[in-house]
Image: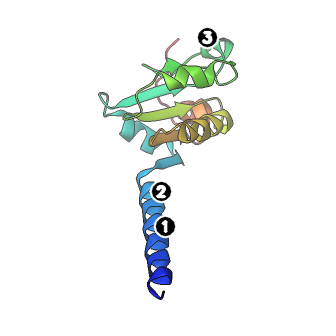
Amino acid sequence: MKLQPFLFLVFTLLVANTAFSRAQTTVNKSITVSEFEEIAKNKGATVIIDVRTAEEIEKGRMPGAKSIDISNENFENEISKLPKNKTYLLYCKAGVRSEKAMEIMQAAGFTYVFSLAGGIDAWEAAGKPIEQ
């Protein structure tokens, strides 16, 4: 009978350890312009996503960015088509919508998702390239 509490303790520790290990392998956070630029250098494994509206993108966007509008009702369907093993760099105008998009992608099982703090406004203020 004393074996039962011991087994329960071992089981609980195993479950907690598994949950902790998974939490450590997920990287989702806001990053600076310089961090964003550094991660973007790994072109084969990194995808830049502009989560702004088409009207906003017409004013300028980061070179090579893919457009997936977070305000579009198909946003979750569109991200579900993306491979989960890549690193995603998200941006919007000021960083609020890309933070939300990052949370949605994390909930959908994406492991490496980063949001540009300050958005494209911070990118432009740092003198980084924009394409029309």
Identify the residue shown where x is 45% and y is 50%. Answer: 26
Identify the residue shown where x is 60% and y is 41%. Answer: 103
Q: Is residue 51 visible?
A: no
Q: Position of residue 91 (x, y in %)?
A: 56, 31
- Identify residue type, mark 1: Ala
- Identify residue type, mark 3: Glu
Which one is earlier in the sequence, the residue at label 3 or at label 1? 1
Estimate the spatial distance between the alpha carbons at disc 1 and disc 2, rounded to whole Å: 11 Å
Q: Which residue is mark 2?
A: 23
**On residue 85, which mark appears?**
none
Which one is earlier in the sequence, the residue at label 2 or at label 3? 2
Position of 96 compared to 132: left or right? Answer: right
Labels 2, 3: front one: 2
Which one is earlier in the sequence, the residue at label 1 or at label 2? 1
Q: Residues within 10 Å of mark 3 (few under 14, many from 20)?
A: few
Position of 22 compared to 29: left or right? Answer: left
Labels 3, 1: front one: 1
Q: Which residue is mark 1?
A: 16
Position of 123 compared to 118: left or right? Answer: left
Relative height, residue 36 to residue 75 (above, below): below
Q: Position of residue 29 (x, y in %)?
A: 53, 48
Labels 1, 2: front one: 1
Q: Nearer the viewer, residue 6 or 87?
A: 6
Residue 112, quarter of the rendered image = top left
**On residue 58, which mark appears?**
3
